[in-house]
Amino acid sequence: MRRSRNDCFDPLRAAIVHKRNGNTDDAFWLVFMFVHFGKHARGGWRYIREIYGRFGEGGLWDWASTSADVDRFEPGFTRTPRG
């Protein structure tokens, strides 16, 4: 079975990479989402991946985008997929 690129997403590994590259804000943002959502038994990191990836709508909800436009971010944050 071939794994998709999405299957490889790991918010903690991504946070480490961001921290090492000096992007502390995104590192902490990913850790926050890790703590908030955790790893779903069936969905894995899907919830964090979908939110961080703007539900596939282009771009990222990284810390800079999120903190600059909380009103636009919030509806997506509360519409997280189930199961």
Image: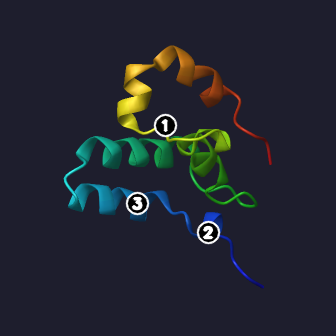
Circle 1 is placed at which residue position?
61
For the residues bearing labels 1 and 3, Cβ distance under 8 angstroms: no
Position of 72 relative to 3 (above/below): above
Judge from the rendering whether residue 68 lies leftward or rightward of residue 80; answer left or right: left
Residue 18, relative to residue 59: is it above or below? Answer: below
Q: In this view, does 16 lie above or below 62?
A: below
Percent x, y of residue 14: 40, 60
Q: In which quarter of the image is the N terminus?
A: bottom right
Q: Which amino acid does label 3 sit on?
A: Ala
Q: Which of marks 2 and 3 is in front?
A: 2
Secondary structure type for disc 1: loop
Numbered tag placed on residue 5 in the rendering: 2
Which numbered disc, 1 or 3, marks the residue that appears first in the sequence?
3
Q: Which amino acid does label 2 sit on?
A: Arg
Three-letter amino acid code at disc 1? Trp
Q: How far apart are marks 2 and 3 (CA)?
A: 14 Å
30 vs 22, left or right, is: right
Quarter of image, res 54: top right
Residue indicated by mark 3: 14
